Amino acid sequence: MSQLSEKQLLGLNMMQEFLGEELFSALRAKARDDLPGKVGAEYIAEVCFSSYARPGLEFRDRALMNLGMLVALNRAPELKIHIRAALKNGLSEEQICEACRHAMVYCGVPAGRDALMVAGQVFEEEKQKQKAEGAKLA
């Protein structure tokens, strides 16, 4: 990849701050190292996450909005990422579930139910991760 633009660097910084180091690193490790993967990563950093530096919305607000939009779009893999980011940015499990439930009104029950199932999977994975980390400390 060529040298990163100022906007791409800003986007990467915002992405790391919004997602947290652990999730950011995991996503970078899974990223494809081919032309389509690089083009997608450049766009996500330059256009999507650089906008997170704009004033007016905190990360928590953006996280909540992302959940609603991803439920509406039925994008379960991306929803998983953003549920983790929502937890990192201060939303509780209850608030995430309520956002999914509220989305049912506008997006339909199937979309909301799918989102709640994804949320349940993420919550369980996060609990298992915490349990494993606790066992390492013991």
Image (tube, helix red, strand yellow):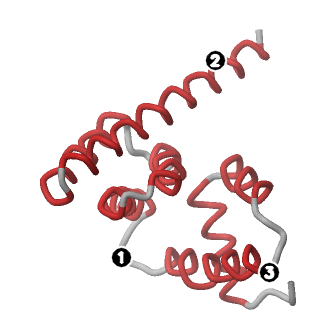
Three-letter code for the amino acid on which mark 2 is drawn: Lys
Q: Is residue 96 left or right of residue 103?
A: right
Residue at the left extreme? 105
**How would you rate the neighbour count of disc 3 (Cα within 10 Å): few for under 14, some for 14-19, many for 20 or more?**
few
Residues at discs 2 and 3 in contact (Cβ within 8 Å): no
For mark 1, what is the residue?
Answer: 56
The kind of secondary structure element at disc 2 is helix
Sequence order check: which comes first, mark 3 or mark 1?
A: 3
The residue drawn where x is 35% and y is 64% is 73
Vertical relation: 98 (above or below) 8: above
Numbered label attached to residue 131:
2
Sequence order check: which comes first, mark 1 or mark 2?
A: 1
- Give the alpha-carbon distance from disc 3 to disc 1, as whole Å: 35 Å
- Quarter-of-image position of residue 11: bottom right
Q: Position of residue 22 (x, y in %)?
A: 70, 46
Q: Is residue 69 left or right of residue 46?
A: left
Numbered label attached to residue 35:
3
- Which sits in the foreground, 136 or 35? 35
Vertical relation: 97 (above or below) 81: above
